[in-house]
Image (cartoon, rainbow, N blue to C red):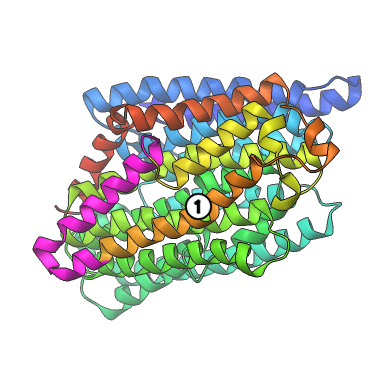
């Protein structure tokens, strides 16, 4: 069944053709050829993936063998692919105008398609080595895209920091994979389940996997690359980094760790994830909050970057509760939050990119009153921030509520510690309001500068991209079953793999 890799093949072929069209642009002085080519292949891959998703949900997983390597599309990989392709399509549409004055269009769209192909491939992997290779296919283009505007020194600095930290993380993860192979003589997920033992080497391997893949997932204290990368990367790439790259990083980590839960070999993984989640969300929210109290000039994208760290905490908390105590609602909330966060945080960064581009400033104080002059952008930006803060009836509220509920459900298992977990998560939500609301307030105060008063909403293509993500943010809040239809089959896969 070669259709299992059809979306992946379309994306990779699209990357080559987008590069070719980009070169044609340079020769014939035509614009947007690379962009329109990339959009076509993004839409094609998305449609194909949705068709295959129906087949997977109705008839079961699709499997194919390529060069002796088996690739497997199940409900879990379908979830990751749909989120990534929808977000990638919106960002590609947005990039048509946003990136039109940047040099290297042929490289930009090629790298974007390859990065998305890597994420789709992560979901298809059936052994640790292939998982690692697709992880690198996702990572390498993201390095170049963060430093895409290489004429800016800050972009080069942030790109180098990102490369160094990610390279160290990749090396640690690969070392952990090597330890597993030395001990078991296989890396295939299904075979590993039969070869795992309680040997200390395997316990050490899990530590390396967490440390290695945890860098890309922006888990505290491995998150320090994220604020710098977001601050200088093109906003379209910031949306990808925050929206799905860090989520895919955690997905990679989760897929690797699930191997060890089948027979309970690495006992305590769920509990470790819960602790890491609480630390991650608290540090992320506090770092975002202190930007307003300890910085004279507050950078909008830096605030959103620290917010992404905090949001990863919620995702990890839900999955951790599911792994530790077999609570399906935890899995459901964690996976649903990957979806809702991808769209609402992607929307926030796209709006931030428009505002920064129109005003020529990255500081919040210089954006005073921009919501009054850029009415559509201001509205959907405020919408995204309220969703991230967990305000009903938007999507962020629904996924966070499921995570909080699953935490409270642990009371019957671990007593007051379960209430404490839920309380810490709730307090973090209140902290988040402390930096989301001031941004919204600033946007709607009277404009103090003529440049702010003269600012207007962007071109139709950028508005279309933002409208798609805004519509999803509203729809998934009012009608969560729309997203849960994709999430619930993936939860069943997690429960089966985890032996629950």
**Residue stretch in magenta:** 392-420
Q: Position of residue 272 (x, y in %)?
A: 31, 70
Q: Mainly helix, strand or loop, the magenta region?
A: helix
Residue at x 57%, y 41% (from the top left corner): 348
Residue placed farthest to the left in the image?
A: 412
Decide if residue 296 is in sight here: yes
In the image, taking residue 85 as reference, residue 201 lies left or right, namely left
Disc 1 on helix, strand or loop? helix
Where does the image place residue 9, in percent across and percent down from the top left?
A: 52, 30
Is residue 399 or residue 10 the one in the foreground? 399
Q: Residue at x 40, y 35 (%)?
A: 394
Q: Report the side of 21 relative to 214 (left or right).
A: right
Residue at x-position 60% and y-position 26%: 465
Please tell me how many numbered marks the rendered image carries: 1
Residue 74 appears in the picture as rendered? no
- Give the residue number, with chain letter if any, for mark 1: 246
Any magenta on residue 221? Answer: no
**Which residue occupies the extreme bottom position in the image?**
200
For residue 418, what is the image quadrant? Answer: bottom left
What is the residue that sits farthest to the front in this orientation? 446
Q: Is residue 229 above or below residue 394?
A: below
Relative horizontal placement of residue 386, taking residue 12 as reference (left or right)? left
Identify the residue at horizontal 60%, vertical 59% (top origin).
226
């Amino acid at each position: 069944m070669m259709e299992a890799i059809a979306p992946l093949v379309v994306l990779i072929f699209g990357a080559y053709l987008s590069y070719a069209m980009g070169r044609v642009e340079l020769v014939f002085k035509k614009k947007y050829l690379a962009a329109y080519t990339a959009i076509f292949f993004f839409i094609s891959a998305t449609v194909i993936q949705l068709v295959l998703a129906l087949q997977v949900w109705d008839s079961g997983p699709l499997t194919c063998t390529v060069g002796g390597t088996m690739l497997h599309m199940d409900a879990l990989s379908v979830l990751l692919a749909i989120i990534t392709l929808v977000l990638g399509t919106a960002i590609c549409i947005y990039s048509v105008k946003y990136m039109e004055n940047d040099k290297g269009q042929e490289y930009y769209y090629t790298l974007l398609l390859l990065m998305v192909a890597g994420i789709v491939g992560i979901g298809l992997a059936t052994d640790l080595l292939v998982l690692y290779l697709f992880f690198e296919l996702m990572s390498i283009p993201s390095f170049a895209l963060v430093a895409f505007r290489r004429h800016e020194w800050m972009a080069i600095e942030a790109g180098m920091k990102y490369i160094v930290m990610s390279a160290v993380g990749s090396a640690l993860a690969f070392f952990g994979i090597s330890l597993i192979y030395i001990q078991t003589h296989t890396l295939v997920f299904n075979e590993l389940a039969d070869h795992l033992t309680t040997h200390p080497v395997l316990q050490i391997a899990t530590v390396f996997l967490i440390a290695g893949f945890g860098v890309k997932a922006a888990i505290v204290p491995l998150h320090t690359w994220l604020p710098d990368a977001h601050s200088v990367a093109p906003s379209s790439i910031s949306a990808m980094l925050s929206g799905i790259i860090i989520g895919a990083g955690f997905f990679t980590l989760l897929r690797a760790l699930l191997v060890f839960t089948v027979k309970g070999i690495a006992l305590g993984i769920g509990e470790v994830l819960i602790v890491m989640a609480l630390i991650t969300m608290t540090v992320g929210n506090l770092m975002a909050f202190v930007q307003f109290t300890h910085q004279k000039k507050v950078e909008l994208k830096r605030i959103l970057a620290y917010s992404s760290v905090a949001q990863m905490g919620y995702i990890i908390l839900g999955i951790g509760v599911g792994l530790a105590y077999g609570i399906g609602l935890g899995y459901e909330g964690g996976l649903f939050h990957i979806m809702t966060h991808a769209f609402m945080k992607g929307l926030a960064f796209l709006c931030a990119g428009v505002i920064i581009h129109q005003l020529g400033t990255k500081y919040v104080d210089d954006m005073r009153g921009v919501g009054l002059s850029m009415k559509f952008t201001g509205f959907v930006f405020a919408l995204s921030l309220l969703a991230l803060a967990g305000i009903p009836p938007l999507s962020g509220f629904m996924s966070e509520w499921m995570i909080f509920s699953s935490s409270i459900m642990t009371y019957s298992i671990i007593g007051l510690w379960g209430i404490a977990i839920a309380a810490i998560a709730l307090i973090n939500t209140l902290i988040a309001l402390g930096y989301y609301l001031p941004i919204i307030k600033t946007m709607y105060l009277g404009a103090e500068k003529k440049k702010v008063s003269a600012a207007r909403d962007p071109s139709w293509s950028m508005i279309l991209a933002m409208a798609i993500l805004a519509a999803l943010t509203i729809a998934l809040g009012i009608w969560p079953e729309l997203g849960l239809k994709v999430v619930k089959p993936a939860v069943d896969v997690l429960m089966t793999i985890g032996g629950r």
